[in-house]
Each structure stands twice: as C-alpha cells, then as structure tokens.
Image: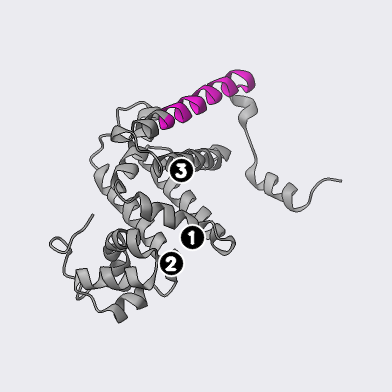
Amino acid sequence: MATAGTTPDLADATLDELRIALAPEIAVAAMFDGWTDAALVSAAEMAGVEPSVARLAFKDGAMGMIDAWVASVDEKMEAAFADGRLDNMPIREKIRSLVWFRLEAIMGLEESLRRATAVQAMPQNVPKALKQGWSSADKMWRLAGDTATDYNHYTKRAILGSIYGATLAVFVDDESEGKADTAAFLDRRIEGVMKFEKAKAQLLGKDREHFDFARFLGRLRYPQK
C-alpha cells in the first residue's frame, strides 16, 4: 500500500489518476471510518491533496471508492505479471498465482474488505459489484494467456469470478497462520473446476462443446413456447 512517504506528486494528476492513487490509502482509512467521506478526506490529507479535489474524483461515493480500490489491485497485478513469469506455468498454477497475488495485495485490510462487501451487497450496488468481479476475472484470464472467443470466454470468467468471490469470503475471516485455510480452500476450488472441465471434455467431446452465445441470449429474450 502507498504511504505518505511514497505517494507520487499528484498536483498534475487527472481525476482518473487521482482515483487510482488515492484508493489504497482510502482502503486503509476504511478500516476505521468505513467507505465514507471521512476516509476520503483522511486519504487526501495523507497524499497532500485538497479534499475538495478528491471529492471531485469520487463523486460516485462509496462504490466509486471501492471500484477504484479494485482497479488499483488490477493495476498492480498487471504490472507484477508483465514480466512473463506465467508463460511456462500450467493453467491451474497461473490462476492460483494471480488470485493469490490479489489476496496478498489486500492482506491486513480484511476489515476494509468486509465493509466493502457490505456496501456491494446493497441492492442498488449489486450490478456494479458484478461488473467489478467480471472485469477482474477477465484481466486474470488475459494475463493467463486466454484467447477464447466462443462461449468458453464467458464461462471461464464466470467460473473464475465465483472462485475468487468465494475465496474472498473465506479470506476475510481467516485467522490461520499465513492464511493457510484460504490457500487450502482456493486449491480445492481450482482442483474441483479442473476435474469438472476434464470430465466435461471426456463426456461431450470438442464437437459438442460448440455454443452459439448470441442464439442463447436470443432464447432468453424470446423463450420457446
């Protein structure tokens, strides 16, 4: 997490840049103040930014702050794995490495995560929370080298999003040393998905896995009678 000593000069930052720069400090403050204006002001003062300017960057309130926090983790993840270290890993290790990196990035901020989850669960915020999860899952798959454009593109992201969300739910209350319980849970979930995909491939075969996503959406809109 950024600190007052490492925060870059934000005098000429755009509002979008300001959001990403302030988000980690807002997350720290949210442990005590929740995702509130008080947390925003605290982060702005730590970074030497006028609170009025910070408020402009977060006119969308608590969900905007949480969204920026998620985006800041996305950005760190993409920078960390840009060196190609994932290239020669099996797919399950790629996914595990990416998910675990994200968990390490928010280690110590469990209370902030708990409060963020409560905000995301509010009915008016659920669509944006789902969009956040989908976006992060998409970024993980792209870093893992996924190039699927058929229905697998969608199912992979949906499955990974569910794994990540479930793992976060364990992580937030995990008091085991080194988050060992979370690591074991993540491994079990990934292993379960890998076994399912292997069994599905053996049962269906590649030819039967073809799926017309546009046609599927059309059926949802105009169900057959």
Q: Which is nearer the N-term, disc 1 or disc 3? A: 1
Question: Above or below — where is 192 with respect to 63?
Answer: above
Taking the magenta stretch, the answer to whether it contains residue 200 is yes
Question: Do the numbered discs 3 and 2 sit on residues whose CB atoms are within 8 Å?
Answer: no
SS category of the residue bearing label 2: helix
Whether residue 86 can be seen here: no
Residue 189 has which mark?
Answer: none
**Residue situated in front as seen by the camera: 179 or 10:** 179
Q: Is residue 163 left or right of residue 140?
A: right
Task: Identify the mark nearer the N-term, 1 or 2.
Answer: 2
Q: Is residue 88 above or below residue 144?
A: above
Q: Residues within 10 Å of mark 1 (few under 14, many from 20)?
A: some
Query: Dot 3 corresponds to which residue?
Result: 169
What residue is drawn where x is 31% and y is 81%? Answer: 52
The reply to whether the C-beta atoms of the residues labelled 1 and 3 are less than 8 Å apart is no
Predominant secondary structure in magenta? helix
Instruction: Name the image quarter holding residue 176.
Output: top left
Q: Is-magenta flag for residue 21?
A: no
Instruction: Identify the residue under disc 2.
Output: 62
Position of residue 78 in the picture relative to residue 91 (left or right): left
Nearer to me, 181 or 44: 181
- Is 156 situated left or right of 216 in this image? left
Badges 1 and 2: C-beta atoms under 8 Å apart? Answer: yes
Under mark 2, the amino acid is Ala
Determine which residue is flagged by label 1.
Answer: 119
The segment highlighted magenta reads 185-205
